Amino acid sequence: MAVFDRSGARVDEAAPELVLDNICKSFDGHVAVDRCDLVLKRGEIVALLGASGCGKSTLLNMIAGFEDPDYGTISLHGEVINAIPPYRRNVAMVFQHYAMFPHLTVADNIGYGLTARRLSRVEIGARVDEMVALLQLSGLEKRYPAQLSGGQRQRVAVARALAVRPDMLLLDEAFSALDRNLREDMQLELSLLLRRLKVTTVLVTHDQREAFALADRIAIMERGRIAQIGTPEDVYRKPGSSSVLRFLGTTNRFTGDLSDSGEVSIAPGLSFAAPVRIGTGAVLVDIRAEDITISREPTALHRTAPAQVVLRTFLGSQERIVLKLDNYQVVIDRPAQVALHQEPLAIGQQVYLEFDPASCRLSAAG
Amino acid sequence: MGQRLMSPRSSHLSPGLPSRFFAALVVLFLLGPIAIAGIVAFSSGDRLEFPIPGFSFRWFAIALSKPQYIEGLTASVIIGIGDAILATIAGTGAALALNHYRFRGRSVVQALVMLPIAMPAIVLGLGLLFTLAVYHMQPGLLAGVLGHAVLGVPYVVAMVTAALSNYDRSVERASLNLGVGPVRTFFKITLPLIRGGVIAGAVSAFLISFDNISLSLFITRGDTLPLRLMQQLLAYADPSVAAISTLLVLASLAGMMLLLPLTLRKR
Amino acid sequence: MQLRTRMAPWLWLTPAGALLIPFFVIPVLITARNSVYRDDPMGFLVPAFSFASYARVLSDSYYLGVFGNTLVAAAIVSSITLVVAYPFAWLLARSSGSSRGFLLWVVYLPIYVSVIMRVFGWMVVIADSGMLNQALMKIGLINHPVRMINEISGMIIGMIHRYLPLMILPLMTSLQKVDDSILRASSNLGGGQWFTWWRVVMPISLPGAVAGTQLVFAGVLSDYVIPTLLGTTKFQLLAPAIYYEATTNAAWALSGAMATIVIVAVAAFLITANLILKRVAPWASV
């Protein structure tokens, strides 16, 4: 079966680039990484996405060789690299605060890995020039990191990593230090560059937008485990669990009661058929802000309930409405275009909620 | 270096056994003679010997009853306090000028203000000896205060500059914005906030002066305590020197304990 | 208002100026001036222009010897303290918490303790009947006590003890710039232990090493007490020599000449060191 990555290039599925097999790591009795498996194909970009403490950075550090797994093997090109020290693995890393060598110029920073690999002066010069052009750093070669802006430093960090032509690129929260507009521009630029160069990449981030912007596949990590892995659409539209759903996008959480007949009721007048049976009793219902719609009239369906508009915010491409339902504060996002064709909602106006039960996720209340 | 920069095997960057051993040796080297001198101060013997024959406070009593020590101590304290005050005033002003303003000649002033550290004190001492004659001054306490103050200025400047770099100038602007003039702003706002650095600088100036020999040789008449102690050691080395030095160490440690809460910035 | 802001820095500098100009700048100038006056054998300084003092200092083997001895001592003390301080400063820069507090305390303590007390401690240790000799004889390494006190060796040991903290502190400040992520970056890009040390740690620590050496040199040039109490008259050092000439001999022109030479040498050293540093480590002043 032929497999194509995002850029449309054909990728040899039979030769995985990176294999993590049953990786476990604990620090002082606390489990940081819990039986993680991961297979990357050549040229693929995978994001490890999760909140702080989920183990994503530890996993990345193990790939780089800065930590050793307690169990499990890491293989690159089919060869187990657990025993290889970091300076002999060809996996280049871009660090969160770039780790620029303050005493070297931009050119020397970029060429650093090449000097370690004993390339000739001429070769190093050529490679550095190539990277400078690729990352648009012309004119800055003789500057020192202290004289550069944050965005420029990030480019140098990327250039330095790519200069050694690594088997894999590792990005450790590489965009977190940039401000929003610059971040989005750089993410786009890097995404195009990595696809063009077909560099296999693992990136670690807590920022969903970054993961979505760059990755072919996203692995959501929670407490040391990979909770779900899939393409961005898969992970977003078909979250495997309540926690994955809550992690991505804006979610509303309701407490409800699941009866024997499979009905969940979360407020007077609001109940629906449970999409999945998870026993009976108290449950938590999670549903995304964009999966709830508003109607001005009650429908005959039993899963609508009246709510009052509390706040309306214009967010550019979207409109956010906050409603008060029973004693919940419900957040609803809808495209601003929808609002354009209607009467604007007034504060205090009574409206009715509607949603598809299949789009919510249930979990047992604790 | 016996220590590995980074152990690829371990997940910490903690030092290995060889470097801990080395550090222990250095600590022993640095502390050893001081500890030994301290122990000798408590000797019950008549002369300088180690290990000490017995434990006694007699040398402390002897030291405190020696007029040359007491005079020396008094002189050193007076000079120390005097020059600490002068150095602090001069150094704080200079640090503020250098930190807050960009002006022509700034780098020259900066070099000048820090120069007394790089300049061997012996040269300064000699120069002051010559200059005192020109000013019709005699070597003594006043000369000591002035000379040691010069020596202390760079330390004050360094400490106050460090304190200034850690503090946010917008509070000064807020003060001016609310109608308080620059001089009052300095005393009400700036000074309290850099208090830690100023005190650290004053203490440094005091300590530098207290222990100074090369300068005091020229500008005092053998008045200061270190000079008196040195004279004693040249004449006949006995534990009284250790005793009074130990007393001073204890006193300065006690002083540090008292001043510590002041140097900690209250937020 | 314009005048006020322009005058402001100078107003703040007034106390410093009032102190430094008459008691620092002028003394240096007067020293230079005295050095070109003539010493009258009666012990007076005669304001007649003469280079006789310089001629004497630069040709007489005794005075040249004094300069030479002091420079040699300074070089020895600087190199030894540099080698000893380096791993210690590295450890200190990377330590934290209570061990860092303890190590810093150990480094700062000698500054709080009088130099006399420290010298006294060494006198006890290295005297003929002192601790070190007793221990060595007990072990059986030597049969007779080794003369260290009032010898060059004793003086060097005392100086190393005195100036080691002065070398540790600037080195530590420099080495603190080498944080974990930079070491990891170097390793990640292919640099092993030695490569990383040579290419990253050492260059970054260079300004600290230079600063430390400057402080040690200045210290040794000025040191009166250690050569006097632990050293020997056979190996004369600069500070006692200058003091002797200025006070006992009242040879103000001669001592002035020696001091002026020291000023020029120190200035030259500072300027060259900074120029070299600017060349080799331009990033440090960026």
Image (tube, coloured by chain):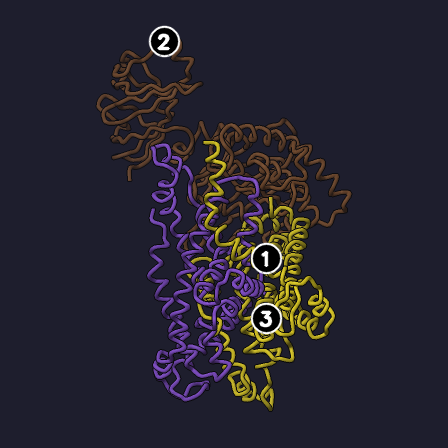
Chain colours: A brown, B purple, C yellow
Whole-Å distance between the Cαs marked 2 and 1? 73 Å
- Find residue A252 and report its horizontal and vertical position in percent: 33, 28
> Is residue B53 or residue C193 the one in the foreground?
B53
Viewer-nearest of labels 3 and 1? 3
In which chain is the residue bearing label 1?
Answer: C
In which chain is the residue bearing label 3?
Answer: C
> Is residue C174 or residue C156 the one in the foreground?
C156
Residue at 62% x, 42% y: name it.
A144
Q: Amino acid at mark 2?
A: Gln
Can residue A68 be seen here?
A: no
Q: In the image as oriented, which residue stretches furthest toward the left?
A: A268
Q: Amino acid at mark 1?
A: Ala
Callout 1: helix, strand or loop? helix
| Occupied quadrant, residue A357 | top left
Pointer 3 local density, CA inside 10 Å: few below 14, some 14–19, many at least 20: many
- Find residue A191 and report its horizontal and vertical position in percent: 59, 30
